[in-house]
Every structure is written in structure tokens, then in C-alpha cells.
């Protein structure tokens, strides 16, 4: 994705308009062509020919698979260059949809703004991305994606600082090898000093059933109190149904 050099809004509000039809009901959005094409290489290719001059084709485009709410967020950003800060975790979902729309429209700045907004919300609310949010982005993006990297970095910290691995995360990591590998890569990027990392070769730790926590204990949790704590963490991390 790439954006052209920024221009003042008034220079992009030309007389030429385009019709964008969104969703299964073909909700009509009438947008300024120059503004839309300035920010989106996708729409520049749609409404202009290779020489950069206006195309003689129809000034209409359909997005039947897009969501009205997501496109409304896009239009809001297009004219204001700002995103509304989410109040509740349930508002993260539409922002992730907006991020995927930004990728489809090849608008790097919008994608960066969404990543920063989502990151700030989790940080300011002292919580972490839920499994379903991470899985949604993994299902719809490729490797080395900025949103992927931000979310998995959050998860790496959450799991590293937790005394147990919640069962739903345990199941997901067993099934999704790429996610597990990405978490390890994220931890490697912390560049920890060797003295700060326990060394199992020193032989000072007891291992096996009945000796210390054990891997099975870490995965499953050891007590009802621990299970309650994991449940509370899950709710804090947005695991409750919306």
C-alpha cells in the first residue's frame, strides 16, 4: 500500500463525483472522485486509465461484500483523516474490518491509523487482544502484516507474564503452528539479556509430575481459584460473547 503526498482537503473536493454501492442492499455513497483516488491506488486504477487521465468508464463501483458500518467508518476517515476512539471492546471488531478494507483499497495511512488506535485502546485499558480478534486477523491477512505483528506482540506479553495458559489459547496454539511461531519471534524481538532468562541447563529446577508446576499444570491450571482467575482474565481480554 502507498499514499500520495498529502494535500489540503479543499484541493481534493472537485466537482467530479463517483457512486459507490455498498453491501447486499447496494447502499449508495456519493464521494468526491479526486479525494477518493488521491488516497486509494485501488480506486485510481478503477476510475483512471494508465496515463493518469480520467477514464471514460462509468463513475460507479460496487462493493457487495463490504459492510455498511465499515464503509461509513472509512468515509469518516476519508473526509476527516481521523478515527473515532473506541469506548468498548466490541468497537474493536469494526475497526479490524476497517483495517482489512484499508488493505483492499491500498491505503497505508489508514491502515497505520487503525493499528495505532487499536494498540492504544488495549494499552489504555490495560487489557489484551482476545483469541477471536487474533484469529480473525490471521484468517484475513498474510505473514509480516502490521496488525498481525501488533496483536501477536500483545499476546506474547500476556502469555509470558501469565502463570497459566488459558485452555482456549492452549487449543489454538496446538492447532495454529504459525501463531505459535510468531509468538516466539515476537519474544525474540525483545532482545532479553541472557541473565534475565532462566537457564534449564543449570539443573536447579525440579521437573516432572509432582515436582513443581509441570507443563501440564501450566496448560490446564492447578486449582479452582486458578480457573476462576483465568476466566476473569478471559472476560477482561474480550472473550465474553458480544
Image (cartoon, rainbow, N blue to C red):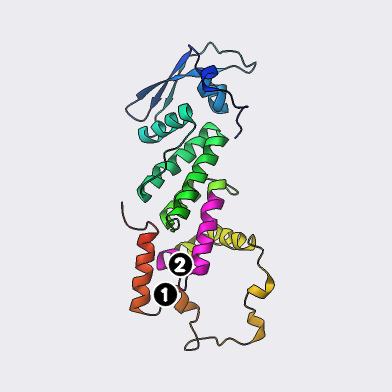
Q: x%, y% of residue 225?
A: 34, 77
Tag 1–tag 2 contact (CB < 8 Å)? yes
Is residue 4 positioned above or below 151 on the image?
above
Q: Is residue 165 magenta?
A: yes
Give residue 204's quadrant in the image. Answer: bottom right
Q: Observer-nearest residue: 24 or 117?
A: 117
Q: Earlier in the sequence, mark 1 or mark 2?
A: 2
Residue at image coords 45%, 67%:
170
Is residue 163 positioned above or below 54 on the image?
below
Q: State the extent of the magenta-drawn residues as a range.
A: 148-171
Q: Observer-nearest residue: 87 or 155?
A: 87
Looking at the image, can residue 148 be seen?
yes
Q: Which residue is mark 2?
A: 170
Give the left or right position of residue 29, taking residue 2 as reference: left
Q: Which residue is mark 1?
A: 220
Please identify the dominant SS of the magenta region: helix
Amino acid at each position: 500500500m502507498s499514499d500520495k503526498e498529502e494535500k489540503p482537503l479543499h484541493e481534493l473536493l472537485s466537482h467530479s463525483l463517483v457512486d459507490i454501492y455498498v453491501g447486499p442492499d447496494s447502499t449508495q455513497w456519493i464521494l468526491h472522485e479526486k479525494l477518493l483516488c488521491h488516497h486509494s491506488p485501488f480506486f485510481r486504477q478503477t476510475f483512471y486509465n494508465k496515463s493518469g487521465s480520467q477514464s471514460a468508464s462509468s463513475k460507479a463501483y460496487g462493493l457487495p461484500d463490504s459492510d455498511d458500518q465499515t464503509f461509513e467508518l472509512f468515509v469518516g476517515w476519508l473526509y476527516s483523516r481521523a478515527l473515532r476512539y473506541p469506548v468498548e471492546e466490541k468497537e474493536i471488531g469494526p475497526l479490524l474490518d476497517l483495517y482489512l478494507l484499508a488493505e483492499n483499497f491500498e491505503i497505508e495511512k489508514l491502515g497505520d491509523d487503525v493499528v495505532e488506535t487499536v494498540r492504544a485502546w488495549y494499552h489504555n485499558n490495560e487489557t489484551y487482544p482476545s483469541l477471536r480478534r487474533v484469529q480473525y486477523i490471521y484468517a484475513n491477512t498474510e505473514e509480516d502484516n502490521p496488525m498481525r505483528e501488533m496483536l501477536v506482540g500483545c499476546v506474547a506479553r500476556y502469555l509470558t507474564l501469565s502463570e497459566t495458559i488459558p485452555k482456549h489459547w492452549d487449543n489454538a496454539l496446538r492447532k495454529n503452528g504459525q501463531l505459535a511461531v510468531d509468538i516466539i519471534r515476537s519474544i525474540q524481538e525483545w532482545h532479553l539479556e541472557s541473565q534475565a532468562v532462566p537457564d534449564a541447563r543449570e539443573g536447579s529446577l525440579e521437573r516432572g509430575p509432582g515436582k513443581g508446576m509441570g507443563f501440564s499444570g501450566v496448560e490446564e491450571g492447578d486449582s479452582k481459584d486458578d480457573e476462576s482467575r483465568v476466566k476473569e482474565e478471559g472476560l477482561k481480554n474480550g472473550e465474553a460473547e458480544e
